[in-house]
Amino acid sequence: MTGWVDRRKALEFAEASIAVDSEHLGNKLVLALAIFGRVPERRAEAEEIIQELVKIEPSHEFRAEEIAIRKQARDQRLAFQEQVD
């Protein structure tokens, strides 16, 4: 999550962003991070989103942004694995 988000409202905001654009990769990443940080019982959902983002092939139009999102997803996947180990 970004430093400016009120963490108590992070999930609410993330779900609202998905309602606006469910295909936006940044929205998906924020939702996964919010779930991971706030709702342990939905961890499988967060992991599924992260796995999807790790596999993206960046588009020509948003290449830099999507490469950054994919890297953040890979980093988060490592964090998931470290919690399991």
Image (cartoon, helix red, strand yellow):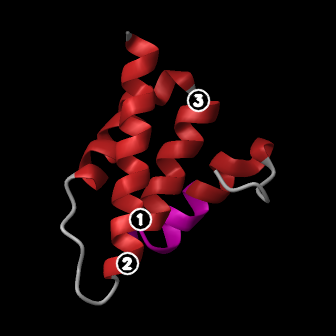
Which three-letter amino acid code belongs to the residue tagged 2? Ala
Q: Nearer the viewer, residue 52 or 59?
A: 59
Disc 3/disc 1 C-alpha distance (Å): 24 Å
What residue is disc 1 on?
Answer: 68
Q: Residues within 10 Å of mark 1 (few under 14, many from 20)?
A: few
At 34% from the left edge and 45% from the top edge, which residue is drawn?
A: 74
| Mark earlier in primary sequence (3, 2) | 3
Secondary structure predominantly adopted by residues drawn in magenta? helix
Disc 1/disc 2 C-alpha distance (Å): 6 Å
Name the secondary structure under disc 2. Answer: helix
Magenta stretch? 15-25
Locate residue 28, reporting x and y percent.
43, 57
Above or below, comparing residue 32 to residue 65 in the picture = above
Q: Are marks 1 and 2 in contact (CB under 8 Å)?
A: yes
Q: Nearer the viewer, residue 6 or 2?
A: 2
Locate residue 73, reporting x and y percent.
38, 49
What residue is disc 2 on?
Answer: 64
